[in-house]
Amino acid sequence: MTVEQRHHIVIIGAGFGGLEAAYRLRDMDADVTIIDQRNHHLFQPLLYQVATSSLATSEIAWPVRHFFRDNKNVTTLLATVTAVDRANNLVLLDDGSKVRFDRLIIATGASHAYFGHDEWEEFAPGLKTLEDATTIRRRMLTAFEDAERETDPAEQAALLTFVVIGGGPTGVELAGTIAELAHNTLKGEFRRYDPTRTRIVLIEAGQRVLSAFPEDLSEYSKKALENLGVEVHLGNAVSVCDADGVVYGGERLAARTILWAAGVKASNAARWLEAEADRAGRVVVDPQLRLPGRKDIYVIGDTASVMDTEGKPVPGIAPAAKQQGRYVAELLMAEHAGKSESVSPFRYKHGGSLATIGRRLAVIDFGWIKLRGAVAWWLWGIAHIYFLIGMRNRLAVAISWLWIHTKGQRSARLITQGKAGVDKVTSGVSGG
């Protein structure tokens, strides 16, 4: 007599989409296996605050195993996926082992896109992982320390010049927070230079920052950045990025710290599946988020290319990934109960766009109402604290923000690795 195997659902990626799907499936009469190359779920919207010394890593990341410790049908594997054998329904791992699946959910997120200049990553790290954030924090703080010892005025000026490439939410948030760090937090702490002389330069190839927001909020954000001391340069793409700085608009700018916030590309899922992909490498899926021609493989989050009801691409943001994870879980449970025909195609519901500019400034676009300034900043903070996981983390982040808001001080200004660790960036794909 053969023992019948339980229905097995494999989820690749423990980001917002993958974790939401696993959470919804935790009580289903099936085995669920989560595979991720990191052992933690990362709250990416606040990653820039780790990079700029506002928060500690433990305040925005949690062990995946902890979430499902009481759900015996959920197994977590720390491993890197190298391929998917579609013909035999197998996920291939880096150690040579294989994981069988009846249903597969791919939620592997995105990494940095350098538009054909991957060699720039060495000089301009992006921000997608905790490793990226701690690398950026280390480079920034080390630049201030090196400037204290530097006797050559030109080299000291280069050390005190920070370039952020890309004027989307991440670029705006980074530039604004670096300005506050340099001009407020560090004020009076150095003896051989004045940190308020620090230059923060935001370079955007387009004609405005926060281009996804309404034009009036975009213009407000630009002026707010300039009031914080950020130099905003629009309409010129970076053509050279190296150890000495950048070239844009035909001009060379000497800078020792360059940060990349200009674009992202999807994970290798399209290559694993030998599937059609869009220009960003995202897998083109059907209205039920499935790989076309397959009813057993789903792709969600930053890895998936799907349109909303207006024919526009669903944005690669956390709420969209969570909605897709929830949808696929509901579809699988309905299918398991023999009611899959009752599930309509996926419909994305946009809750609004939010971006913070500084510790007291933000912009919010809910469609029916637009907010800016301090009120928007408080709402932005409340929304982010609400979506954090666990009361301890909510309290820790709230207290950190309150302290920064009232005192202007940041408690996570630690250089945890020596200068030997400054030069190499560790980058990878996080779950979407």
Image (spheres, grey):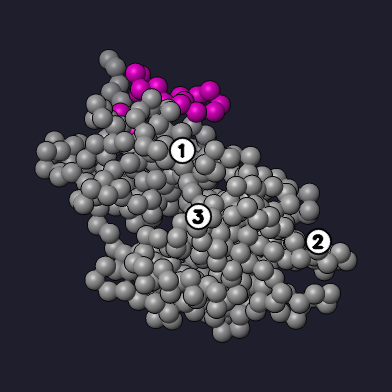
Residue found at x 38% / y 25%: 274
Q: Quadrant of residue 200?
A: bottom right
| Pointer 1 with pointer 3, Cβ within 8 A | no
Residue found at x 51% / y 52%: 262
The label shown at residue 267 is: 1
Q: Quadrant of residue 12?
A: top left
Q: Secondary structure at mark 2?
A: helix
Compared across the picture, whether 366 is left or right of 91 comes to left
Compared with residue 430, is residue 223 higher up or lower down, i.e. above or below? below
- Find residue 371 and report its horizontal and vertical position in percent: 35, 76
Residue at the spot of label 3: 205
Compare marks 1 and 3 and give the one earlier in the sequence: 3
Q: Secondary structure at mark 1?
A: loop
Which label lies toward us, 2 or 3? 3
> What amino acid type is highlighted by mark number 1?
Ser
- Find residue 292 and report its horizontal and vertical position in percent: 26, 30
Q: Residue furthest bottom?
A: 406
Magenta stretch: give its range.
82-105
Whether residue 189 appears in magenta in the rendering, the answer is no
The crowding category of the residue bearing disc 3, from other C-alpha atoms within 10 Å (few below 14, some 14 to 19, many at least 20), is: some
Residue found at x 36% / y 68%: 215
Which label lies toward us, 1 or 3? 3
